[in-house]
Structure formats: structure tokens, C-alpha cells
Image (cartoon, grey):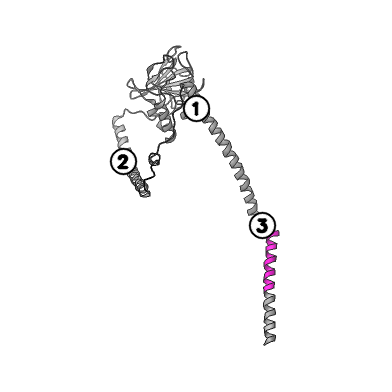
Amino acid sequence: MEQFKRILYTIVRYLVATVSLSVVFYILFALVFSTAEERQLQHENSLYRERYRSMQEKEALIGDVLQGLLEKDDALYIGLFETEAPSLDAITAADLISGSDSLSESFYLSATASASESLMLMAGNVDENFAQIFEALQARRDSIPPLTLPLHDLSYAQTGASVGPKHNPLYKVAVQHDGLDLIAPLDAPVYAAADGTVSKVIRSRRGLGNIVVIDHGNGYQTRYCLLDETTVPPGRRVKRNQKIGTVGISAMVTAPHLHFEVLKGGVVQDPVNYLFASLSPEEYARMLYMAVSTKQSLD
């Protein structure tokens, strides 16, 4: 019996030693030698690390460029309008109630649920509302399609004063402003905002300078003022986004820009109300805010 125990003990000891050595050899082998799949994964990880570092550098560079552009836009606005640019920080419901620490979590949850329910109801009526709008427009047949921007690659920071009493930079008093100022460099191309026929071309060194007037039918006209060059004659049929002239300047304005007007039956309209289809909702909201907030015109 004792001999059997010694034999069993010896077998167990050898088994434990064999398994331990196998584990050690496997670990050493895994550390020294890698499979093709592992080498591929290691290579991919190395590439991802390099790409991540490159993306971090690009992100930092883009952030610096954007900050520089914002500072440049602010400086341009201050130079032209002699005041700081309006703040575009959105005021949300959370901002309005964040100052109160006494509001419970249930209040936030119920308010969010109520807002979500309202949004769902509004979304459900979108199709019906659009159908009613299209029916009304078809019945009237006196509408004008949404206009495109008469200047390409225009940012909201280039938006000046729109229609209304604005402070005139030359007379230093409030004067009725009948168009939308769009800041642009000299000789920047100006394009037709919609299909139409050139009804009038005015060449003058006074007032709003050279002007192109396009008739779009149904009583609608667009006027492109303060042009340096006009490239279309009266009677010419033009298409949307067709070049009609270039941005200029006159002795009566403080900086080169396009003075853009929209008229319906001879009555001045606010052009910014017709440009929503040319921009993203965020860009349009910013342009609208700048047009309303700018109190000084450029002409």
C-alpha cells in the first residue's frame, strides 16, 4: 500500500511539473513568436495609433483656423459697423432654468416628456401643413420660388443690415433701408437669384450706383445695386445662378458690398425672408439674426 502511494505521488508530481512546464513554454513561445493574425492585428493597431495622432494634430489645426476666422469676422464687423457683432449663442430652456437648484429631477423629466410630445404632434402635422401651403400657392399663382443667394460661398458673418430704419454711416441718422447688405470683396461675381428677364440696367455714379433689375413675373422683382460691372443687357432672359455683374463700390458707401432688394408690386420686401432654401437651417437662422440685429447699414 505504501508503495502504491509513492507511485501515485510520483505520477501526480510529474503531471504537475509537465503541465507547469507546458504553460511556461507556451507563454514564452507567445511572447517570442506571434501568429500571422497577431502580427496583422499589431500592424493595424500601430497604423491606428499613427492615424489618431495625425487626426489630433489636424483637429488642433482646424480649431486654430476656426478661431482665427471668428476673430477675423468679429474684427471685420467692428470695422464696418463700429460695434461688436451680435452674440449668436442660443438660449435654450435648460439655460433659463439652470439657475435654480430647487427644481427636482421629476420636473426635468416631465418637462422633457411634454416637449417631446409637442414635437411629435407638430411632426405629425407637417405633411398636412405642406399640402395646404402648396394648394394655397397653386390657387393664387402669384408666388415666387425661393431665391438663391446672389453671392456664392457667402457665410452668415457677411450679412449686414436688412430692411427697416438703419443708422446711415454718412449722415449719422436713422434712414429707411430698403434692401439686404451682403459684404463681399470688389469684383466678386453677382448671380441672378431666380429665373427672369432683365427689365432695367441703370448706370450711375451716385446713390446705389450701377443697378440690374430682374423681373420674375407675378409682380416680383429683384434689384442688384452697387455693381461695378454689369454683364447683361435689358431684355435678356437669365437663369438662376447666371452671372449678371460684379460687386462694386461708390462714394456714398463705406465698404464694397451688394445691396440686394426684393419687390412685390413695387412694394419693398425683406430679402432675407426669401433665402431660406439656399442655406442650412442653422446658417439661415444665423443670417436672419445678423440681418435683424445689425442696426447700421453700409449705404
- On screen, residue 56 above or below 228: below
| Residue type for callout 1 | Asp
Residue 136's place in the image compared with 231, above or below, is below
Q: Marks 1 and 2, how far apart in space?
A: 42 Å
Picture quarter containing residue 274? top left
Q: Secondary structure at mark 3?
A: helix
Question: Does residue 80 appear left or right of residue 36 in this picture?
Answer: left
- What kind of secondary structure does the magenta stretch mostly adopt? helix
* Image position, residue 194 (x, y; %): 41, 27
**Mark 2 — residue?**
128
| Residue at 57% in and 39% down | 59
Q: Nearer the viewer, residue 76 or 265?
A: 76
Label 3: few (<14), some (14–19) or many (≥20) C-alpha neighbours in 10 Å: few
Instruction: State the residue at coordinates (67%, 83%).
Output: 5
The residue range painted magenta reads 16-35
Q: Residues within 10 Å of mark 2 (few under 14, many from 20)?
A: few
Please tell me which of labels 3 and 1 falls first in the chain: 3
**Disc 2 secondary structure class:** helix
* Distance CA(mark 2)–CA(mark 3): 61 Å
Q: Nearer the viewer, residue 172 or 180?
A: 172
Mark number displayed over residue 74: 1
| Quadrant (top left/top right/bottom left/bottom right) for the C terminus | top left
| Amino acid type at mark 2 | Glu
Residue 72: x and y, percent?
Answer: 53, 27
Identity of the residue drawn at 56% across and 33% down: 65
In the shown orientation, is residue 26 left or right of residue 254?
right
| Residue 36 tag number | 3
Q: Residues within 10 Å of mark 1 (few under 14, many from 20)?
A: some
